[in-house]
Amino acid sequence: MRDSTTSRNYVMSGIAGGLVVLVIGGVLIATGVIDTGKTTQIVRETSVAVPSSNLDGEASNSQRNTPTVEEIYKADGPGVVFIQAKVGQQSNSPFGTGQSGTATGSGFVIDTKGNILTNAHVVEGASQIAVRFGDGNLIPATLVGQDPSTDLAMIRVNPKSAKLHPLPLGDSSKVQVGDPAIAIGNPFGFDRTVTTGIISALQRQIEAPNHFTINNVIQTDAAINPGNSGGPLLNAQGQVIGINSQIATGGNGNGNVGIGFAIPINTAKSAIPQLEKSGRVSHAFLGVTTAAVTSDDAKSLNLPTSKGALVQEVTEGSPADKAGIKAGGTQLASGLIAGGDMIVKVDNKPITKPDDIAAVLAGKKPGDAVVVQFYRGNKVQSTKVTLGNRPASVDSGAQSSQDPFPFP
């Protein structure tokens, strides 16, 4: 980080630390948590190759046309930027609190028009944004749009003010556990740092700044730290497969412990056109909070199945409420609320757990109609629901379609 006048103390809170470095009255605070996704028709990416000379006499990297980490860094590094955002009154966000200060993070160029993708929490509440390419000077940037529900934001620089190097976007649906992963960013202000690892898990969930859940999140053990937020997670071909967003610290420190989370690039691909056109992204909204049940829960509650999503709460006035979906009213010692409808299908797709509802809604837009099939008692019923527009935050009276992991 280039601001030598500000002392810094890095503090992580929550199960996963948000990766923006926020300097507030001499204290730098970074936080975050949770969401999931699924992969379909998975194709394994080519592995990052070993050095060209080895005891077995294998062909060199150039002979195999597989780029090395060094080659990827040289090719993609110029497209990764350092972001500095001057923050005024800070909103009540799990990613940072305080009155004022400077937030720093990472981003990457996506086109020759000057558009740069980053995390929403990097520029949240910013009154002034600037970016730096490599060792150059800070240049002004403007906020094009942001989507707190996916923790994505787009900023823009004058294309004449910098030599733009757009990064190639990959396909996150083809990512598989064990694939190589490369992260480039600005951890703790150290410009354009590269770290490597593998894709360590898929189908994770992280919590967005507005407390809704983000699906299809990629987990990696490539070292990610505060300041990496918004930077690219790359595959072995140097293509962006994710946007580094959060880390889990285990509560023992403020740095990397080998568990980082990246928003899949396919999520960003669907958001980018809306961000550029209107500055915001619309998300379909059902208006229920649901919970998974075990086979023992199903027996004790006399449910016909344990495969589904038990409705815990229905937001008043929501599409689900208007369609007649009911929540329970009996709080159990286990924490479950008994007596609600058990959703087993949405849009004719089986629902075996709460995450499945979010996965179905991810492919919908406000105004779309879906048929929700559920058990009420032992009787199967169905209702047609016209999906609404997701509210600004869970705090505004809406609930996500699955329970978020709690902050400790």
Image: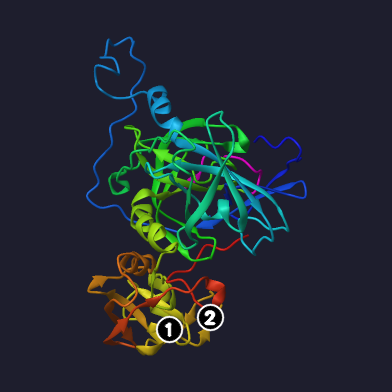
Label disc, if present, on residue 318 of the rendered structure = 1
Rendered residue at 66%/45% (across/down): 252
Q: How far from the left and from the top, in percent, is residue 394?
A: 53, 72
If you read the primary sequence from the N terminus, does the residue marked by circle 2 or circle 1 appear first?
Answer: 1
Judging depth in this view, the residue of 373 and 189 nearest the camera is: 189
The amino acid type of the residue labelled 1 equals: Ser
Image quarter for residue 204?
Answer: bottom left
Q: Image quadrant for the N terminus?
A: top right
**Where does label 2 land, which residue?**
332
Q: How far from the left and from the top, in percent, is residue 383?
A: 28, 86
Q: In the picture shown, does residue 75 fall above or below 31?
A: above
Residue 258 part of the magenta-drawn span: yes
Q: Main secondary structure of the magenta part?
A: loop
Q: Residue furthest front?
A: 160
Rendered residue at 31%/32% (across/down): 237
Q: Which residues are magenta?
A: 251-261
Cα distance in 3D space between marks 2 and 1: 25 Å
Q: How far from the left and from the top, in percent, is residue 205?
A: 45, 57
Judging depth in this view, the residue of 170 and 403 nearest the camera is: 170
The amino acid type of the residue labelled 2 equals: Leu
